[in-house]
Each structure stands twice: as structure tokens, then as C-alpha cells.
Image (cartoon, grey):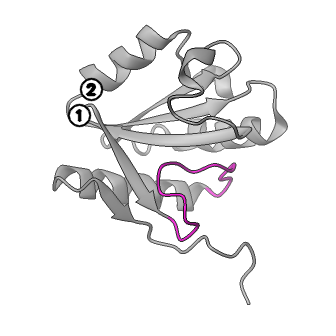
Amino acid sequence: MSYLLTHLPNGWAIDQAIVTEEDRVVVIRFGHDYNPECMKQDDVLASIAEKVKNMAVIYVVDITEVPDLNSMYELYDDCTTMFFYRNKHIMVDLGTGNNNKINWALTNKQDMIDIIETVYRGARKGKGLVNSPRDFSTKYKY
């Protein structure tokens, strides 16, 4: 269902999307369009886009089409999600050690909605780093 999401074709479009949005969080999923993991995350993002439209706008970028940002944002994983608010990168502490981005396919709708809501509330308060509502340091619950 990634066809329901807006695809950004070049670096200029990505920059404009980040710079021009003033009231909502910009969620960008970087990855390969034909990767099964990314397609699962795209389904999640497309299904929640209507629910979070007041808080966030969601874009998709194929890193093979826009390779100039790969080194700047360190996009070496198959599926990466980043958050921006008012031209500022918002970091999320997920308990994994990497606060810059989510570098796996998050396929739980409610987890993604909760993270976007947390980023939105923290960014509106001027925070550059927000704590995730759930700890993702372990994959399985013990």
C-alpha cells in the first residue's frame, strides 16, 4: 500500500518537505521500495496516515533513487524511519542505543502511532530527544 503514501523523488523534494512543514512532524521512511520488510512498514504507515494526519505527514523515499542522502543520514539499513519538526531532526530514545532513527521495520500500528504522538508532543515543547513510550531494547518479552 505504499502507493497511498507520497514518494519523494530527489533530495530537493525531501529538503522542501522538511523545511516547509511548520505544524506537523515529518515522518520519512527511507528504504528500498521492493524490500518485503519496507513494504510491511509502508502498509502500517499507510493505514495510520489518516489517524495521525493532524500530528504528522508521512513520506517514502527509495534510497536507490536518492543516494546523495545515504551518507548524510547514514542510511545503510534496509528500512529506516526518521522524524523532523520545523526543519529540526527529532531523535527518539527507543532503548536500542541508536537515537537518530528507527532502523528496522516497525510493523505494529499502535507502536507507530504512539511513537509519532510522543515525537509530536515532545517536539512542540522544543525537545530534540524524546523517550519512546515502549522499550525496544529486547525483541521478545521475557
How far apart, in angstroms, are the residues tagged by discs 2 and 1?
A: 6 Å
Which structural element holds mark 2? loop
Residue 53 found in image quarter: top left
Are the residues tagged 2 and 1 within 8 Å (C-beta)?
yes
Position of 72 with respect to 3 (left or right) is left
Above or below residue 142? Residue 31 is: above
Position of 77 with respect to 58 (left or right) is right
Which structural element holds mark 1? loop
Residue in the image at 51% along x and 65% along y:
94
Above or below residue 54? Residue 118 is: below
Label 2 or label 1, whichever comes before in sequence order: 2
In the image as oriented, which residue stretches furthest toward the bottom? 142
- Asked whether 102 falls inside the magenta stretch, the response is yes
Q: Position of residue 20 (x, y in %)?
A: 25, 20
> What's the amino acid at mark 1?
Arg
For the N terminus, the quadrant is: top right
For the C terminus, the quadrant is: bottom right
Count neighbours of disc 1 (C-alpha within 10 A) and say few if under 14, some if 14 to 19, many if 20 or more. some
The residue where tag 2 is placed is 21
Q: Identify which residue, 115 or 66, lies in the foreground.
A: 66
The residue where tag 1 is placed is 86
Q: Which residues are magenta?
A: 94-108
